[in-house]
Amino acid sequence: MHGFANPARFLRIARWLMPLCMVLGLVVAALALGWGVFFAPAERLQGETVRIVYLHVPSAWLGMAGWMGIAAASFTELVWRHPLAAIAARACAVPGTVFTAVCLLTGSLWGRPAWGTWWVWDGRLTSMLVLLFLYFGWMALSQASESADGSENRAPAIFGLVGAVNVPIIHYSVIWWNSQHQAPSITMGKSAMSGDFLVPLLAAMLGFTLIFVGCVLARMRAILANQQAEARLRRKAFSEVEF
Amino acid sequence: MASSIKAPIKAKHQRLVLLVVALVVLIGAALLAAWALRNQASYFYVPSDIVAKPPEPDRAVRLGGMVEQGSLKTAADGVTVNFVVQDGKARVPVTFKGIVPSLFVEGSGVVAEGRLAANGTFVADNLLAKHDENYVPREMQDMTKDQAKQVVAETQ
């Protein structure tokens, strides 16, 4: 793992991996959405409104996966002080926030025709909203914590790990507590969802996941480039003082 | 002098152990909190809760369960519906006046917001449909399981 400690090596890989993920992800996601919207069947009870599932479920998965990414990077940062860990955590935050927001918005739009309400304060919806606020708080904290001794990544890393407790709560909220939201359709090796819906849904999840990875790699490259530029400016300022 | 011969624990191993212990404690605390919240965090009562421990007459509560097959009746005024919500153990009759959500059908899930009247009927002010985790294409809804399997086998 420490082979990637050298940012130059990471950048060499990210340079081709990032566009590959992006292009592949956009193609797969577009095909899956087209399939879901135009070719997949309508649902027995919900009719055409079921088609929003192809956007809602991938967003929910990536909203949660984004925070698991922050948590994994935070763990690496705290234990091994890996130089890329804090950068990876920061890179996960924005795409994770966007997908969480998309999940809440599409869920609300879906709730109106399916349940008869835009919003209810049940366990699943509330814990997902908490996740969005955790993202906001995490981004604010990682922007605000700066110090000279290199410990600026510690507070966001601890926040990232503590906040990860919310992810299993989101998942199990519909199992532990009675809720308006239904229980998961796809569980380990089993699906209560007919294959006509399941296959395009899995394809959409794969496509959006690739886009997510592409976004994270792009953000990591941008943050590294920013740090290099700042270091160069600092060196320049120092040398001017000395001469 | 044995302790001085032993290699000192590496700082990163110490951090690893500390962090794993902290995480175990954190997850334990979260599980305890979730367990303690199991009643408060539930969005509705199921019929057996209502029957076992009826809420006070004027307290607003939510009742959730399945609409019993064959129980849905529309009253003479055309806007009042009466039906029975059951969870397999208990049944609660519900009355509601208004427009029902489109997913509200017999045998499907429902969440009713309202009050329990003195005669044991639940008077709902608002109905929310609940859909279950099953997603079935429209074409297959009227078929039996065997017929649907046959169609799937034919198309593959």
Image (spheres, coloured by chain):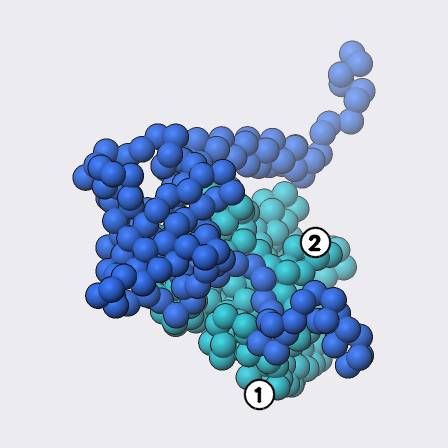
Of residues B19 and B143, the one drawn nearer to the viewer in this rendering: B143
Q: Quadrant of the N terminus of chain A?
A: bottom right
Q: Amino acid at mark 1?
A: Phe
Q: Nearer the viewer, mark 1 or mark 2?
A: 1
Horizontal and vertical percent position of residue A198 = 65, 70
Rendered image quadrant of residue A4: bottom right
Q: Colour of chain A?
A: cyan
Number of the label disc, if any, that sits on residue A188: 2
Label 1 marks which chain's residue? A
Q: Is residue B69 above or below residue A194?
A: above
Q: Which residue is mark 1?
A: A38
Horizontal and vertical percent position of residue B58 = 19, 39
Q: Amino acid at mark 2?
A: Met
Horizontal and vertical percent position of residue A162 = 49, 43
Q: Farthest left residue? A: B58
Of residues A15 and B27, the one drawn nearer to the viewer in this rendering: B27
Per the image, label 1 sits on a secondary structure element best described as helix
**What residue lies at 41% left-to-right and 55% top-to-bottom?**
B71
